[in-house]
Image: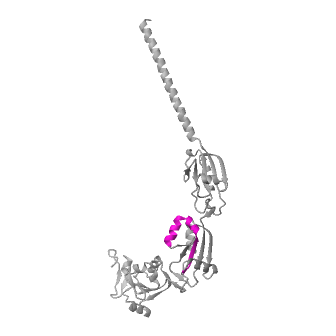
Amino acid sequence: MNKAVTLLLLGGISLLVLLSLINAGIILGLDSRMDAKISQIKEASRPASIQLTLIQPDCDGCTDASPLIEKIKQSNINLTSEQALSPQDASSLIDAYGIKRLPAIILEGEVGKISAPNFEARGNGLVYDQIAPPYYDPASGTVRGRVNAQVIDAPSSCKQCLDMKTIVDIFTQQGVFFASDAEFKADDPQAQKLIRDNGIAVLPALIFSEDAEAYPDVLQVMTQGGFKKSGNLYVYESHLPYYNLSDKRVYGLVELIMLTDKGCTACYDVSLHKQILANFGVAISSEKTVDISSAEGQQLLQQHGITSVPTIILKGDAVLYPGFSDVWGTVGTIGKDNTFVFRDNGALGAGFSYKNLTSGEVITVPAENPSA
């Protein structure tokens, strides 16, 4: 073998060795990166080691945290320890994590590996203390959100007066916790004291303890609805109809007279007006239907200058209802004696039929001109 061939063979062998070394290095590098990636995947999939602490006060009516704890246990974590502490035993944790409401849950350990909705990152842990009322306030050592309700009924003469317990029921449905719900007659000594102490002028009345402040959204509704702060209490005096304590009279009752023509079978049902009045909150103390063919009907036509039927006449305290007179002024008249007479039948809208008493014509309100 000549020298040139020998050199060529040696060069080829050297190149093969070099390529083998390079490939081995690449493979080793890939293996190393792959091992690191596998380690990362394993670490990411490893359940986080978590220590759970429940701070549980002795609180009747407070939210039960156990369903949330069970949900945490069912998640992909390794719960290495679990403890329940009283507020006294957990005072250092309460201070360290700035806890304002109890019961509260603290998660510690590998909290960076978990997602815990509604928990807030504080210090080295995750904290859940956004408990709905009632809750224990560790700063004051008291339970907040246990509302005491007291109802003072109107005298039996006010049969249409509002049942205040319906308001209590509505707030209960909105999540307010009532620790007590007392009801007093107007002449009860306890009721008389509440009336004096809180300057109550009309009945029925509803009184809530200051624990209502634990429900900000509800408190806003209360304030907008007419509750007023009286010392440490919130007092609501009934809207119309109500019993006035100073003159011992019921205000807000309205007498309804429905005037019809039995000969007009196409005319709309006059009782439709009852639903409209109910929508305005008008309390009807008595009602009657009078046909224009009767002597009373003829008298009403002449007395009020009525020119179309069906219609209604309101007597009593309709003028006391806020805003009602303004609306009525667009469809009827209000007499000096506060008698309300409905006159614009066309305002009811398209398709409603009524009788023009001047012409004797039955008119159906057309769609293109609902106020005709």
- Provide residue 194's location: percent of width, then percent of height: 60, 77
Which span is picked out in magenta? 201-225
Quick one: 273 or 197, which is closer to the camera?
197
- Provide residue 300's location: percent of width, then percent of height: 41, 91
Q: For the stretch drawn in magenta, what is the main secondary structure?
A: helix
Quarter residue 358 falls in: bottom left
| Drawn side of residue 91 relative to residue 4, left or right | right
Q: Does 52 sit above or below residue 255?
A: above
In magenta segment, residue 101 = no
Quick one: 190 or 71, which is closer to the camera?
190
- Provide residue 6's location: percent of width, then percent of height: 44, 9
Farthest-out residue, bottom: 295
In this picture the colour scheme is one colour
Query: Could you tell me which quadrant the N terminus lies in?
Result: top left
Please say whether residue 95 is visible from this viewpoint: yes
Q: Does 144 sit above or below residue 294?
A: above
Which residue is painted at 57% across and 38% down in the image? 42
Quick one: 131 or 3, which is closer to the camera?
131
| Drawn side of residue 41 relative to residue 315, left or right | right
- Provide residue 103's location: percent of width, then percent of height: 62, 57
